[in-house]
Image (spheres, rainbow, N blue to C red):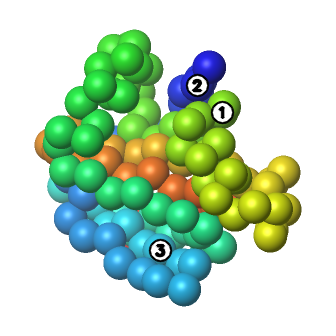
Amino acid sequence: MEKVISYDKLNLDIEFIEEFKGGNREFEIYFSDSVRNKFKLQFNNVLDIRYSVENGFIDRISNIPVDILEDNRIFVLTDSSYFNNFTFQISGTIPTENIKHYLLFDRVDTGIELLTTNEPILKKL
């Protein structure tokens, strides 16, 4: 069963995801917080990414307790169907033991999920 865990290494107040870009296993997510500070969150060695606006994340977000949502907007998931389907699709072509599933979303309508072997890097702009 999927478990959603607050990613405590970063406590992100993501008011609005303004842009994300990347390719070739590197992605950057640009966002602003509730007081309009701007940040870049960088993920390296991204193996898969999913992006959705509003409807694709309504059910997932509604199952996260409100008190957790107030404190953070980035999570690590364990035993997720997304990770399990990815593992099935790659058919053993790469090791999977160090892959983490990250979920982040803003307070408006954007959600991003990533599978990566590296910790995210936060930079204030």
Q: x, y (%) of residue 6?
A: 55, 30
Give the residue type at disc 1.
Answer: Thr
For the point 59% across and 47% down, the residue is 85
Contact, mark 3 vs mark 2 (Cβ under 8 Å): no
* Depicted 108 relative to depicted 41: above or below: above
Along the line of sight, the residue nearer the viewer: 9 or 17 = 17
Q: x, y (%) of residue 57?
A: 29, 37
Q: Quadrant of residue 96?
A: bottom right
Q: x, y (%) of residue 100?
A: 67, 49
Residue occupied by mark 1: 78
**Could you tell which of marks 1 and 2 lies nearer the N-terminus?**
2
- Please state which of the two labelled residues, at mark 3 or mark 2, is closer to the viewer: 2
Real-space CA distance between mark 1 and mark 2, rounded to the nearest whole angstrom:
6 Å
For the point 18% across and 39% down, the residue is 55
| For residue 13, side relative to residue 68 (left or right) | left
Figure quadrant of the N terminus:
top right
Real-space CA distance between mark 3 and mark 1, rounded to the nearest whole angstrom:
21 Å
For the point 54% across and 86% down, the residue is 24
Crowding near pointer 2: few (<14 within 10 Å), some, many (20+)?
A: few
Contact, mark 1 vs mark 2 (Cβ under 8 Å): yes
Q: Is residue 64 visible?
A: yes
Crowding near pointer 1: few (<14 within 10 Å), some, many (20+)?
A: some
For the point 40% across and 57% down, the residue is 50
Residue occupied by mark 3: 27
Crowding near pointer 3: few (<14 within 10 Å), some, many (20+)?
A: some
Tell me how many marks there are: 3
Residue occupied by mark 2: 2
Give the residue type at disc 2.
Answer: Glu
Q: Quadrant of residue 31?
A: bottom left
